Every structure is written in C-alpha cells, then in structure tokens.
C-alpha cells in the first residue's frame, strides 16, 4: 500500500506532486504517534499564554480602579502656578 508523505493538488483536484513510500505491515506501526512528551512544549506554551492573559486582565482592571482615584486626588491639590489668597487658606469649605 502507498503511504503518502506529501500531495499537492491543483484547483481541479489533479495531482501535481506526490511523495510516498510503499508499506507492508499493520497500520498501528505506520505514521506519527503522539505521546505526552511530544506535546509537552506546546501545552506549556498554551498554559503560559493563558496565565499572562489573565494577569494582563487583572492589571488592567486594577489600573482602571486606581486611575479613577488618582484623578480625584489630583483635583483636590493646590496648583503651584496660582497665587494663594487669604480667603482660600482660611475657608476650608470653599470648593475650587
């Protein structure tokens, strides 16, 4: 029987190139067999990408919360380029 390594077809499904070998034996010994070790690297990369994605989402969520607080803190600060008046210093209830 023929075991194909590579087949290239054109748009009319006609064979342009074929690479194969003849095989005599049972199908269980023919072809590529995957086990845990052969897929370990790919699984580790997927796990790392998932962990980094989750971490990025947490950072973005935390930054959104902290960003709102920083804006509120900056609005209550005294501006350096404005002169201080006696009314501004003595009246704590005045909102600027």
Image: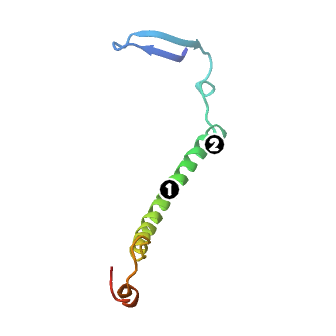
Q: Which residue is mark 1?
A: 56
Residue at 47%, 58% in the rendered image: 57
**From the viewer's perspective, is the residue at label 2 or at label 1 nearer?**
1
Which residue is nearer to you in this view: 40 or 80?
80
Which residue is nearer to you in this view: 28 or 78?
78
Residue at the far right: name it: 37
Q: Secondary structure at mark 1?
A: helix
Question: What is the quadrant of residue 13 in the picture?
Answer: top left
Q: Is residue 26 above or below residue 11?
A: below
Which residue is nearer to you in this view: 37 or 52?
52
The figure's colour scheme reads: rainbow
Which label belongs to residue 44?
A: none
Q: Is residue 84 above or below residue 49?
A: below
Query: Spatial distance from mark 2 to mark 1, Cα to Cα?
Result: 24 Å
Mark 1 or mark 2, which is nearer the start of the sequence? 2
Question: What is the quadrant of residue 20 in the picture?
Answer: top right
In-image side of 68 versus 45 (left or right): left
Where residue 47 sits in the image (x, y, percent)? 56, 49
Where residue 75 sits in the image (x, y, percent)? 38, 73
Where residue 5 sits in the image (x, y, percent)? 55, 18
Residue at 48%, 15% in the rendered image: 7
Q: Residues within 10 Å of mark 1 (few under 14, many from 20)?
A: few
Q: Secondary structure at mark 2?
A: helix
Which residue is nearer to you in this view: 49 or 89?
89
Where residue 45 sits in the image (x, y, percent)? 58, 44
Q: Which residue is mark 2?
A: 40
Question: What is the quadrant of residue 8 in the picture?
Answer: top left
């Amino acid at each position: 029987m023929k075991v194909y390594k590579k087949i290239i077809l054109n748009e009319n499904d006609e064979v342009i190139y074929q690479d194969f070998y003849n095989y005599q034996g049972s199908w269980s010994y023919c072809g590529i067999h995957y086990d845990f070790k052969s897929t370990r690297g790919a699984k580790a990369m997927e796990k790392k990408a998932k962990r980094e994605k989750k971490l990025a989402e947490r950072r973005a969520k935390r930054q959104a919360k902290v960003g709102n607080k920083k804006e509120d803190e900056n609005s209550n600060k005294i501006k350096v380029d404005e002169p201080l008046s006696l009314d501004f210093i003595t009246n704590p209830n005045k909102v600027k």
